[in-house]
C-alpha cells in the first residue's frame, strides 16, 4: 500500500508524456487493456452462467488441438483447474467464442464507443462479478458496509 502513490504518480507521468510528446492516443491503450481484462472476466462469468443454466455432463468434452486448448485455458480465469488442453467442455468453448465476438465488436475501429454501450456494460459487469467473487468478507458489519457502498456507487 505504501507504493501506491508512487505507482500512481508514475502512471500519470507516463500518460502525460504520451500525450505531450507522441501521437499515441492513451484512450486506445486503455480500450485494449480494458478489453483484455473484460474479456478474461467475461469468459469466466459467461462460462459459469452457461454451466448453471445449461448443465452438460463432463463426459461430453470436445477434442481440440493442443495449442488452441492451451490458448483457451490461458485466457480463462479458471486456467488453474485440472484438465487436459486437448479436450474442453462445451461451455468453455461457447463462452470463449461468444466473448471473443463481443470483444472484437467492441474494438472494431469504425464503431464509436457510444454504439457499443451494451458490450462495454457487459464487460464491466463481468469484471465486477469476478472482483466481488475474489473478496473475502470476515464479518456481517463489513458485508453491510460493502453492500451499502456498492448500492450508492
Image (cartoon, rainbow, N blue to C red):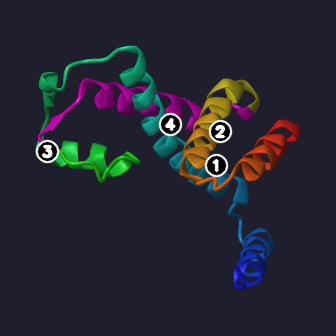
Give the position of the C terminus as an image quadrant: top right
Residue beneath disc 2: 124
Residue positioned 83% across, 45% down in the render: 149
Q: Quadrant of residue 106?
A: top right
Q: Residue at x 17, y 45 (%)?
A: 83
**Label 1 secondary element:** helix
Neighbourhood count class around disc 4 (C-alpha, 10 Å): few under 14, some 14–19, many 20 upward:
many
Does the residue at mark 1 contact the one at mark 4 (Cβ under 8 Å)?
A: no
On whether residue 100 falls in the magenta region, the answer is: yes
Circle nearer the N terminus (3, 1): 1
Quarter occupied by residue 126 = top right
In front of the other: 28 or 144 = 144
Q: Residues within 10 Å of mark 3 (few under 14, many from 20)?
A: few
Q: Which residue is mark 4?
A: 42
Question: Quarter of the image containing the N terminus?
Answer: bottom right
- In the picture of the structure, the residue carrying the numbered disc 1 is 31
| Distance CA(mark 1)–CA(mark 2) | 12 Å
Whether 139 is among the magenta residues is: no
Q: Which span is picked out in magenta?
A: 85-113
Q: Residue at x 51, y 49 (%)?
A: 36
Tell whether 92 sits left or right of 118.
left
Q: Residues within 10 Å of mark 2 (few under 14, many from 20)?
A: some
Give the camera-side residue of 56 and 85. Answer: 56
Left/right placement of residue 24 relative to residue 103 reads right
Sequence-first disc among 3 and 4: 4
Label at residue 84: 3
Where residue 120 sits in the image (x, y, percent)?
66, 34
Say if 46 sits above or below 86 in the image. Answer: above
What residue occupies the far top of the structure in this picture? 54
Amino acid at each position: 500500500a505504501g507504493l501506491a502513490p508512487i505507482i500512481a504518480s508514475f502512471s500519470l507521468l507516463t500518460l502525460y508524456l504520451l500525450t505531450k510528446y507522441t501521437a499515441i492516443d492513451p484512450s486506445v491503450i486503455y480500450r485494449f487493456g480494458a478489453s483484455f481484462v473484460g474479456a478474461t472476466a467475461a469468459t469466466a462469468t459467461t462460462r459459469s452462467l452457461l454451466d448453471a443454466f445449461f448443465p452438460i455432463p463432463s463426459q461430453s468434452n470436445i477434442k481440440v488441438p493442443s495449442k488452441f486448448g492451451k490458448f483457451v485455458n490461458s485466457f480463462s480465469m479458471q486456467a488453474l483447474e485440472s484438465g487436459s488442453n486437448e479436450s474442453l467442455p462445451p461451455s468453455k468453448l461457447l463462452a470463449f467464442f461468444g466473448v471473443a465476438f463481443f470483444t472484437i465488436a467492441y474494438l472494431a475501429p469504425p464503431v464509436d464507443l457510444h454504439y457499443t454501450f451494451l458490450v462495454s456494460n457487459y464487460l464491466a459487469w463481468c469484471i465486477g462479478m469476478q472482483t466481488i467473487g475474489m473478496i473475502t468478507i470476515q464479518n456481517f458489519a463489513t458485508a453491510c458496509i460493502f453492500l451499502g457502498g456498492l448500492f450508492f456507487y
